[in-house]
Image (cartoon, rainbow, N blue to C red):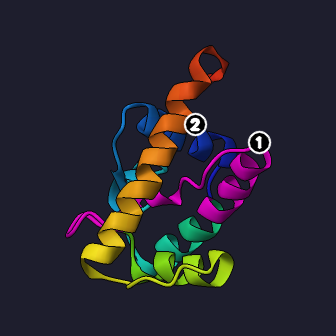
Amino acid sequence: MVDLDLLERYLLRAARERRSVTYGELLGFFERRVTWIHVAALCKDLGKVGERIAARGGPEMACLVVRKSDGIPGEGYFVSLREEEGYQGSLVGPEAVAELRRRQAAAFDYAAGLGEAFSDG
């Protein structure tokens, strides 16, 4: 749906700034409206970018993309963690938020550690 190189740079820039981004912000950057179809397509692209970053030893970055309403990803994010990584925690509430913050911290640290190797293109 979107340019994966541009998506990766956007996420790494946000991580270097130690901030999350909303689905709306990210879709707006790519001149897309927030619809369930666009969100679903974006999530697939986030997975592809995540695979690229993981291949270089980095953490997943989808944790940075959150809902405007509550600042956490959709439940599908946590479902995928269960399926792919064996996450056993809650899909909502304080336990989910704690797991999210841990993952975001790893993303922030990774991006900060890229230093000059990071090209904001």
Give the residue drawn at x 41%, y 56%: 102
Neighbours of disc 2 within 10 Å: few (<14), some (14-19), many (20+): some
Where is residue 101, by image quadrant? Answer: bottom left
Give the residue drawn at x 62%, y 55%: 2
Picture coordinates of residue 20 (x, y %)? Answer: 35, 49
Where is residue 116, by image quadrant? Answer: top right
Depth check: give the residue in front, 85 or 21.
Answer: 85
Mark count: 2
State which region is magenta: 46-72
**In the figure, is residue 38 to the left or right of 3?**
left
- State whether residue 28 appears in this view: yes
Q: Which residue is mark 2?
A: 9
Q: Secondary structure at mark 1?
A: loop
Q: Using the image, determine if residue 118 lies above or below residue 58.
A: above
Give the residue drawn at x 67%, y 49%: 4
Where is residue 115, by image quadrant? Answer: top right
Q: Which residue is mark 1?
A: 56
1 or 2: tag closer to the N-terminus = 2
Q: Using the image, determine if residue 80 lies above or below residue 20.
A: below
Label 1 vs label 2, nearer the camera: 1
Picture coordinates of residue 69 (x, y %)? Answer: 20, 69
